Image (spheres, coloured by chain):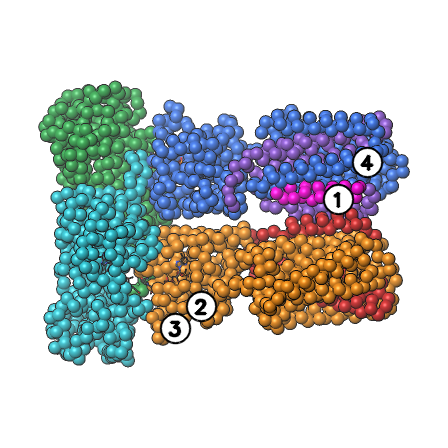
Chain colours: A purple, B red, C blue, D orange, E cyan, F green
Amino acid sequence: MSLDLLTAVTIFVLSLLVGVEVISKVPATLHTPLMSGANSIHGVVLVGAMAIAATAHDTLGYVLAFFAVAFGAMNVVGGYVVTDRMLHMFRGSRKQG
Amino acid sequence: MSLDLLTAVTIFVLSLLVGVEVISKVPATLHTPLMSGANSIHGVVLVGAMAIAATAHDTLGYVLAFFAVAFGAMNVVGGYVVTDRMLHMFRGSRKQG
Amino acid sequence: MDTAIQYVLLAAAACFVLGLRLMNHPATARRGNLLSAGAMGVAVVATGVVIARHATITVTGWAVLFAGLATGSVAGLYAARSVRMTAMPQLVSLFNAVGGGAAALLAVSDLIGAHAVPVRVGVPASIDIAIGAVTFTGSLLAAGKLQGLVSGAPIVFPGARLVNVVIAALTLGSGVWLAARPDNTVALVLLVVGALAFGVTMVLPIGGADMPVVISLLNAFTGTAVAMAGFVLGQTILIIAGALVGASGAILTKLMADAMNRSIANIIIGGFGTADDAASAEGGAQGTVRSGSADDVAIQLAYANKVIVVPGYGLAAAQAQHEMAGLAQLLTGHGVEVTYAVHPVAGRMPGHMNVLLAEANVPYPQLIEMEEANGEFARADVALVVGANDVTNPAARRSGNPISGMPILDVDHARSVVVIKRSLGHGYAGLDNELYTDPKTTMYFADAKQGLAALTAAVRTFVG
Amino acid sequence: MDTAIQYVLLAAAACFVLGLRLMNHPATARRGNLLSAGAMGVAVVATGVVIARHATITVTGWAVLFAGLATGSVAGLYAARSVRMTAMPQLVSLFNAVGGGAAALLAVSDLIGAHAVPVRVGVPASIDIAIGAVTFTGSLLAAGKLQGLVSGAPIVFPGARLVNVVIAALTLGSGVWLAARPDNTVALVLLVVGALAFGVTMVLPIGGADMPVVISLLNAFTGTAVAMAGFVLGQTILIIAGALVGASGAILTKLMADAMNRSIANIIIGGFGTADDAASAEGGAQGTVRSGSADDVAIQLAYANKVIVVPGYGLAAAQAQHEMAGLAQLLTGHGVEVTYAVHPVAGRMPGHMNVLLAEANVPYPQLIEMEEANGEFARADVALVVGANDVTNPAARRSGNPISGMPILDVDHARSVVVIKRSLGHGYAGLDNELYTDPKTTMYFADAKQGLAALTAAVRTFVG
Amino acid sequence: MSDLTVGVVREETPGERRVALVPGAVSRLPTGVVVQSGAGAGAWFDDDAYAQAGARLASRAEVLATADVIVCVHPPEDALRAGQALVGLLQPQRRPDAVAAWAAAGVTAISLDRLPRTLSRAQAMDALTSQASVAGYKAALVAATAYGGFFPLLTTAAGTIRPAGVLVLGTGVAGLQAIGTARRLGAVVSAYDVRPQARGEVESLGARFVDLPGAASGSGDGGYARALTEEEGRAQQAALAEHIARADVVITTAQVPGGRPPVLVTEDTVKLMRAGAVVVDLAAGPLGGNVAGSVPDTTVVTDNGVTVIGAGNLPATMAPAASTAYSRNITAVLAHLVRDGALSLDLTDEITSALVVTHDGVTHDGGAR
Amino acid sequence: MSDLTVGVVREETPGERRVALVPGAVSRLPTGVVVQSGAGAGAWFDDDAYAQAGARLASRAEVLATADVIVCVHPPEDALRAGQALVGLLQPQRRPDAVAAWAAAGVTAISLDRLPRTLSRAQAMDALTSQASVAGYKAALVAATAYGGFFPLLTTAAGTIRPAGVLVLGTGVAGLQAIGTARRLGAVVSAYDVRPQARGEVESLGARFVDLPGAASGSGDGGYARALTEEEGRAQQAALAEHIARADVVITTAQVPGGRPPVLVTEDTVKLMRAGAVVVDLAAGPLGGNVAGSVPDTTVVTDNGVTVIGAGNLPATMAPAASTAYSRNITAVLAHLVRDGALSLDLTDEITSALVVTHDGVTHDGGAR
Ligand SMILES: NC(=O)c1ccc[n+]([C@@H]2O[C@H](COP(=O)([O-])OP(=O)(O)OC[C@H]3O[C@@H](n4cnc5c(N)ncnc54)[C@H](OP(=O)(O)O)[C@@H]3O)[C@@H](O)[C@H]2O)c1
Ligand SMILES: NC(=O)c1ccc[n+]([C@@H]2O[C@H](COP(=O)([O-])OP(=O)(O)OC[C@H]3O[C@@H](n4cnc5c(N)ncnc54)[C@H](OP(=O)(O)O)[C@@H]3O)[C@@H](O)[C@H]2O)c1
Ligand SMILES: NC(=O)c1ccc[n+]([C@@H]2O[C@H](COP(=O)([O-])OP(=O)(O)OC[C@H]3O[C@@H](n4cnc5c(N)ncnc54)[C@H](O)[C@@H]3O)[C@@H](O)[C@H]2O)c1
Ligand SMILES: NC(=O)c1ccc[n+]([C@@H]2O[C@H](COP(=O)([O-])OP(=O)(O)OC[C@H]3O[C@@H](n4cnc5c(N)ncnc54)[C@H](O)[C@@H]3O)[C@@H](O)[C@H]2O)c1
């Protein structure tokens, strides 16, 4: 996984642009679920935490890795579930438009 | 200018996503100017054409390079100018909203 | 194989984008979240495969990994499922805190474990740790404030401003130091401690009403921290997802602040000093009043099956009958059943509402009388009270006041109540209306004409 | 330095995105185009600097470079400035053609000059050449059709379908071959020739009315080709900008097709066989009728200073008075001056329009009489004729027909005319109305009630 | 250019308060105007107003003697002299004797009720339309005033008042105007006409069109209805009965050109109606009306409590408005007929040829009607 | 539970067509009902209808003899017996003699015009409001019918007709209803009232409120206006004059509790008005009206062509609607006063104490008014 800085920055910038564009005029009622949904996405830090766990080799490393993985997992699992619960109330959306 | 395929694809995909998101609900009257504007942007091929010219070293290369550069320049210059002319008619846009 | 997995991760990242996009619309939001969750699952499994294939992981490593996964998942799942609807925002804040913490830990662990860290990783690592740590304590505190564990009022102590500046300077300084010397443990510790402290001092002076905006802002922070972690670890998916959340979170924060008529700068900077006054619009002694925006009300209306409109003198005073009829027509056109419940003494003359609604060409069959309406409220999703007051005031059911004994429209029997008026001001009888503090009630403070126009526009964005 | 320039190029790419974003709204579109143009200038200069610094370029190379730049720029500038407004679409198509051509040339030149081309470049190169060449001839042909150099009618000859399939297969085959063997010149030549031919056969059977959609599609093609060229040359900015245009162009094409009630598949596949019937809605013998969508009309109204509404029997028949008043109110609220010109015999009874507009509560001062209105049309940006026919028919100015000598509303004196009615059907007097073929006139075919509602919604998106 | 003198006489018909030319129209005429003193009094236009507008006031005899063109609503009984022109709603087919007298005397008689009404450019001259318009508006008011209930729906502390059901029969100009006015007042309006195109016009005013499955439909020439056969008429009456019985207010306006107005509401049907119901018969006149038993200019209450109002000349009750509109029609006709200060009758002109009843001793039948 | 019998007598007041109880209300009463034969005829309710609704028909004498409670609009002149109750619009302050007689006879007199009207729960009993509502609606119709022009604006081939300008003076219940009705008809309506809160109410009906810079403003008790001083009154008259002069139609409804109606339109002001203008005076009555020279129940045309209509009892001209609403009020009052089949007067109750005029020989002044 080599990544030179320019490439990393390029990807970063493009992702920022995507992030800016992807939020349109959202109804206020969706603000919180949307925030929660975005919150779950940065739970992807779990992937990084797993990589750390994979390279850890001393106690400090294991401890850090444990917390990183646990935190990440909590962010991911809790985040998606709570978002889904929030969105439950829009179930009534049976309109065509 | 080395670029491994994975990175190139990553950038390509991200740019596609940006492209998809960047077009919102556009009034029909702007369709043509917007198309023209996008048309100008792919005039960036000129940059590639310049690179080709920089590495050309035989007649065929020069000829190809000449056409590539001329085509690209025409796309860029003509594209932006014509788009600007089209957009001239929206000058009257003095509303606040 | 590794490359293939990288493509899988890229696809997952693209799905995050798609998921967020779908979450912009009520009708597709849930699907969006599921897509995003699915992509996340794929990404985790793919990473697991990579780790297994490389086989550099120790057995303890595996144990730690699974223990962490299990602990985090169970905790997250439990918290998410058991939380009450009203407590969800603080839970989101909590999840955000652990996300930020994890991002900071990544960089810390990388720096500690590293032997010859190239300097240029120092910059993102330093940013990652700073932001991650600030988010960690800041989000925890925000959650605590919302939950009531910490006072929701802005907490300001003498010299707070000075302390803040000192801590900020310390954090900044150690951050720069660490960026330059990524292997310096002192710098690392200083930065961690400073940032954790700054998270606290940043959120402490901000009032409870502004918390949603702050949480959203901290959410964007975490995104950025995760992206930086991606730089440190060289993981593209972290960069993409992190930047995505960073940018979209920032936009969302702006939208949220706009919807509340606040500016982000005001909230953060204003936090250091002035008390916030967003809550002053709320009810006096008798209870709390929930007020909503046009969008909030619009979504209730757009997704209702049955709406009963209760017009009152305010509708006439604002001459908003055409806007009212227009809104009703829009809703009817999208399959919502709309009727008008006309109270016998609504307005200021017999038949006032009839004259008004006739002017707006509301067909007679849409008007229902009080008795009939009172039978129907229980089946209504929304009772939309427009400029009416006395005729909906439950005080009439008690004795000892000027409207005692007057039959009223039982709007409080509807599943939810929306009241459009300019303030909590009184009606003809000069009485407070406890309907406004009913937990079912959303107040939409506006002149009826302007308010209904805004509402119509908002509804249109949903039913489009 | 080189890295710095790469960052500059990245910034330029970001500016392209921003520019496109700004071009989504009428008010900022021009700024967006300028930003995009500026970024392009920067990118070109930066590339020039890189070339100069590396100094591998020959003197001839420089000469070729500058000659090409000059030739292209002058040609582009001249064409863009001298073209008539109405001929712009074909010019855009021409620019698109040369862009696609350039993209193809890049790959060709790279493959020819290459010694040991790694196989994986073969795929993008092959795609680049195929798409670029198709776009080149396809766009040229599309421009020719629009310009009238080639018949605008769908051109179908016996066996066309077979020829098409054969050429497509040839192109595909040689493309795969070239992808596998990037140094095989035969494959290269075959691919180029095949793709050029396919561009022609693809566009030939498509009718003139569908050309805008086709041009937009070819535009997206070029974007993709350029992105592929970026893969071949390893130039990030080409990948970003190309993919950006590829994706946004595709979305735009879909929007355009939707606006014309066509599907892209229909246009392309339908091209091979059925004649297209989009033009059949157009006028009979006497002239061409220009019809517009709600969006087209809405933008005219939203950006007008003065609108005069001419109501007629159709407004009453559709009972659209409330929608009419709503639209007028919306416009008035955004600073447009709206009045109603009431013709003495509009409708079917004396005062019909008055009864109607009174029902919608249109204030009396907004009604103006015929004489006054006829003095004002010249100052009006839009005359909005809603369900009126005879009272606007210029035939009244001639003798020898049932309405000769009747004074009419001189809507044709307004800067532009919009007519809302369901068809080109006649009014009470049973006469054709030459107003509808006036070049100033846009017909918006709709039932007045539905049409005005759609129009209101559309206007709201502009002034909202 | 005013060689020509236009004379205005006071209307002598009982109950007629209109005047053929209002002061405001005097200056619009390119001719001299002489007005009988007191001619406008019924419509609240006093002699001063005429004088100020530039008219000369005179006695009736003097007006009749000096004017080249006499304008009127109803034709005066006075003898006219050769070469003199008479312009008004002359109803020639109901006055064969007068027509003969005018022809004999060499009077040019020009009748506005012979106008080809579907011709768009003739609309400014269309006095039948302008007067029917007044009548229709007033009919709704008369009905509302006579009716003991509210027209609109009202929800009040003293109970909810149901809106009145108004049925309009015959939806020509007057009928449509009555529909519009009754709707404005908040009544629930339905309407019926024998011409098929009436449906769209009724609905364009927001009223409901009544379908009569059994009844014939009949358009005649010039936008008018044809007279139904006796059998068709009876079928229509029968089909209408139930609708009429349900109505609180019925307004009838049906006419057929030249003939007597069709009877739409029979005596039996009136008996079916509720006590307190109101019927306004705009067709009531010397030849009968749309309602059996209606008496012109009289209000009759039947035994079962139905008020039947014979309202054949409602425009006269709104004399100021009706006269103002009528003057406009008259001036438009004169503008059409007067060339260079003299009456010039181009009998090849579609409009002129239709309008002229007698000229130079010859009687014209005006084609249609 | 019907130990109690409610009696309905025929109204004797000249021109009064209302009846205190309509057949539809009979069954809503928890008591027996006895109705004088022919009592409802003026409002088109025949005896059959009463009988079907469950009432007993009887002669006047029998009704007066048997009924425990007599309901009426205007109080009957007949002598009543001790313990009998009389419910109606008794106007006690205008009938001191009658009040004394009731007290002397031991009659319980209950007058609806003493109701505390600002009390929301009393609104169903508010006969003044229900009748004023009818009067206001009818006033606009009467004005429109009397006026020689159109109320709405109409653009026609025979010229454009300007809308009528209607001025409403006094915007209580009747005034507001008149505004609403005139606006419905398309008139341009402006209005004035002395109470400051009237502005909002006028504007809430889409009419323009007339500002009188010089004039006093005056609210009294119970939502009513106070009587102005003579000087204030004169200033008001002067300030109103120019507005009245500009109007085509003026409708006046001003009242002050107990006193005589204020004169708002003086004789001089009427002289300023245009010929053809119409004034409807809803306050016209025995004590005078808002318009100098208005005569109750009479239409006067002034020398300068202004039609002044004294319309003090318009509800009687809409007897069916007015009676129906009035019955609702009466039944609401009875529902309030009747407990367990007997009249039970709780004089500590705010409403009851206000309503009772005489009871057990004692005369109550009812507090306010
Ligand atoms: N119908 C009759 O015959 C009659 C006659 C006289 C009195 N009344 C009495 O009037 C009352 C009628 O009840 P109601 O519920 O119709 O009216 P209400 O109780 O008087 O309340 C009207 C409400 O409308 C709001 N409002 C005023 N202007 C507004 C505007 N421009 N936009 C939005 N809201 C506006 C006011 O609140 P904000 O100031 O907060 O906006 C006010 O609280 C009853 O008490 C009844 O007894 C009735
Ligand atoms: N005012 C009077 O007193 C009177 C009385 C009788 C006759 N007239 C005559 O009527 C005519 C009036 O002129 P005008 O311009 O008002 O009307 P018009 O010439 O009759 O034209 C009306 C137009 O409205 C359109 N239309 C019908 N229904 C519609 C709907 N639902 N939505 C949208 N458009 C609809 C029709 O076109 P599509 O079918 O294409 O939609 C029609 O061409 C004059 O010729 C006049 O002489 C007037
Ligand atoms: N400019 C124009 O073109 C113009 C102007 C005005 C009127 N018109 C037309 O002229 C025509 C005549 O109008 P009018 O008001 O003088 O008509 P009218 O007075 O002759 O008759 C009134 C109505 O009665 C109806 N009627 C006749 N017999 C009936 C029956 N048995 N049952 C039910 N209804 C019956 C007629 O159809 C007509 O609508 C209308 O079609 C009107 O639209 C045209
Ligand atoms: N439920 C309720 O609360 C309720 C119900 C009905 C009426 N009301 C109120 O009762 C009040 C009386 O109504 P009403 O119609 O019986 O009033 P009213 O008949 O006593 O008087 C009619 C109007 O004339 C006005 N007036 C008096 N003197 C005037 C002058 N010199 N110049 C101009 N105007 C003058 C009064 O202000 C009043 O508005 C009103 O305020 C009304 O809103 C309240």
Residue D387 as seen in the image, left or right of residue B36: left
Q: CA distance from mark 4 to mark 3?
A: 88 Å
Q: Say what amino acid the circle numbered 1 marks.
A: Tyr
Whether label 4 touches label 2, CB < 8 Å: no
Identify the residue position indicated by label 1 in the image: C7
Whether label 1 touches label 3, CB < 8 Å: no
Q: Say what amino acid the circle numbered 4 marks.
A: Arg
Which is more toward the observer, F363 or E277?
E277
Name the chain under label 3. Answer: D
* Image depth: mark 2 or mark 1 in front: 1
Does dot 3 land on a helix, a strand or a loop?
Answer: helix
Does dot 4 land on a helix, a strand or a loop?
Answer: helix
Question: What span is colored magenta in the figure?
Answer: C1-22
Whether label 2 touches label 3, CB < 8 Å: no
Residue F223 locus on image (x, y percent): 33, 35
Whether label 4 touches label 3, CB < 8 Å: no
> Magenta region, mostly helix, strand or loop?
helix
Q: Say what amino acid the circle numbered 3 marks.
A: Arg
Residue F59 locus on image (x, y percent): 10, 30
Identify the residue position indicated by label 4 in the image: C53
Question: Eyeballing the image, is E61 above or below D106?
Answer: below
Residue C110 as seen in the image, left or right of residue D262: right
Name the chain under label 4. Answer: C
Name the chain under label 1. Answer: C
Q: What residue do we see at 26% from left, 71% from top?
A: E333
Q: CA distance from mark 1 to mark 4?
A: 16 Å
